[in-house]
Structures are given as C-alpha cells and as structure tokens.
Image: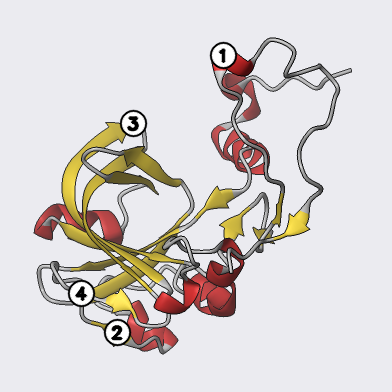
Amino acid sequence: MRTDFDPTETGHHRFYKLMTSVVVPRPIAWVSSRSAEGVDNLAPHSFFTVAGVSPPVVQFTSVGRKDSLRNIEATGEFVVCLASEPLFEQVNATATNFDHTTSEFDTVGLAREPSLLVAPPRVAASPVALECRLRQVIEVGDCFLVLGDVLHAAVDEDTIGEDGLPVLDRLRPLSRLGRDDWGLCPEVREITRIPVEEWPGHFQPGATRDAPPRAGRSSD
C-alpha cells in the first residue's frame, strides 16, 4: 500500500518538505562568498554535488535568490568548505537569514583563512576547501543552479590516509536529512564494482557478498 502525492495538489511547501525527506542524506556545500562591497558571506546549501570531472565542476542550488548567489554573480568567485561534525552548531547558525551587510564569519565567530586563488576566504576550521570560479547559473523555477570550476582544493593533511586521499571518519562530514534532522558520519559498507567480463556466475540475486557495515574506515 502506498500514499500518492501530486505536486500540483499537495502544495509547493509540503512537496518541498516531502522531497527533502526522501532525497537523503544530502551533502552540504558551506559556501563562502564576498560581496562587491567586500562583505564576507557564509551559508550552507544542502542541494550539492559534483557536476563534472574534466574539468572539475561542483554544483549547488540556491533555493531563491540569496546572498550567496548575488555575491557570486557579482564577483564570479566562491569557496565550498566542508561542513564537518565538530562545526555542527556553527554551520546551522550560518543558515540564519542575516542582513546582506552582516558577515556570518564575524557574527558566528569563525576564523577566516586566505584562499590561494580567489578572494572569498576559507573557513579556517573546515578540513576541506574547494576554491571555485563561476561557470554558469541556471534558473529552474524559483531555484538557481550554481556551477563552479574548481580551481584549487585545500585539504587538512590530518585527514589524508596512506593512499593520499581523505579518509571519511577523519573528515566527519555532516549531511542534511528531512525536517530539522542532520546526519553524522555514516556506517560504511565496502563492495567492488563488478566488471562485465566477470558477470556470469558472479552475482546471485539476494546473495550478500560485501563486508559487514562499519562506522567509517581508515586506510592507515
């Protein structure tokens, strides 16, 4: 038995709440931008993903025309900082609808760190910062998809494992769920992709071939 929801009948706000309750977990782009007047803005956006590989491109969605979007359109630059568990309350605080002349860095008490290639600063306490140049803004109804070319990635060396890549349980990323719920570092299950030449006899429906779940993992 299922309950059916028609977006034209459910209502805009309630259907939005439905979508954010089922498209979970969602990674958070903690976006740093600088206005044309020089005010540093910082805000979390939970519609966020990798949009391209070569060149590297990230994408986040501004639901409505917010300060992040206006600043990025004016200057062409932004930084995506990783929203990590130790910064949980600060990330949430920067979602407050402050006036555009107010800097969330100063109001929330977050230290800045100079970026290497763009003007907006990084969050000094964030373990990862992706410095971006605006590629394109795509309007979709009342939302705006912001695509940025990643010019530089700065990663805290303490999060990097022996293979040279960041380790999940050292990054401790936050994610957004439905309602006012947030996700912490999840359980991890590891399984390799099946090469097509190995498919015959490799997979049986209902069979479990992967390792048991574990809370993050370290490559050290």
Q: Earlier in the sequence, mark 1 or mark 4?
A: 4
**Which of the labelled discs sits on residue 112, or is there none?**
2
Establish if 70 lies above or below 6: below
Tag 2–tag 1 contact (CB < 8 Å): no
Establish if 8 lies above or below 18: above
Q: Nearer the viewer, mark 4 or mark 3?
A: 4
**Alpha carbons under labels 3 and 2: distance apart:** 32 Å
The residue indicated by pointer 3 is 140
Q: Is residue 200 left or right of residue 143?
A: right
Residue appearing at x 66%, y 59% in the figure:
183
**Alpha carbons under labels 2 and 1: distance apart:** 51 Å
Q: Nearer the viewer, mark 1 or mark 3?
A: 1
Amino acid type at mark 2:
Arg
Tag 1–tag 4 contact (CB < 8 Å): no
How many numbered badges does the structure rendering display?
4
Q: Earlier in the sequence, mark 1 or mark 3?
A: 3
Residue appearing at x 55%, y 64% in the figure:
173
The residue indicated by pointer 4 is 115
